Amino acid sequence: MQNIPTDLSQQTVIVTGASSGIGEATARALVENGAQVMLAARREGRLKELGELFQMTLGLFKCIYSRR
């Protein structure tokens, strides 16, 4: 198994299914390791909650919400 870098400050990542489960956990881990993360999911309300949570706890998160 490859070593996964812990400093992701130069990386931008899109996470689909980010409103729950593995997608949410992945987004959280990426943000905690410095990545710029774009969240995508069907549940807009839950994405807003997550964005606000990341912003409050990490202070490094910018949220942009868009409809189709």
Image (cartoon, helix red, strand yellow):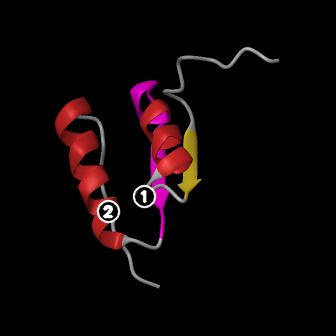
Say what secondary structure mark 2 lies in. helix
Q: Which residue is mark 2?
A: 46
Relative to 53, residue 31 above or below = above
Tell me, yes or no, whether the highlighted magenta stretch contains residue 33: yes
Give the alpha-carbon distance from disc 2 to disc 1, as whole Å.
6 Å
Q: Amino acid at mark 2?
A: Arg
Query: Horizontal placement of 10 versus 51: left or right?
Result: right
| Badge 2 vs badge 1, beta-carbon distance below 8 Å | yes
**Residue 19: image tag:** 1
Quarter occupied by residue 1: top right
Image location of residue 6, percent across then percent down: 55, 17
Tell me, yes or no, whether the highlighted magenta stretch contains residue 45: no
Image location of residue 27, percent across then percent down: 47, 42
In terms of depth relative to the viewer, which is nearer, 68 or 47?
47
Residue at the image point whose x is 21% and y is 50% from the top: 52
Relative to 37, residue 19 above or below = below
Classed neighbour count for the residue bearing mark 1: other residues with Cα under 10 Å, few (<14), some (14–19), many (≥20):
many
Q: Amino acid at mark 1?
A: Ser
Magenta residue span: 30-41
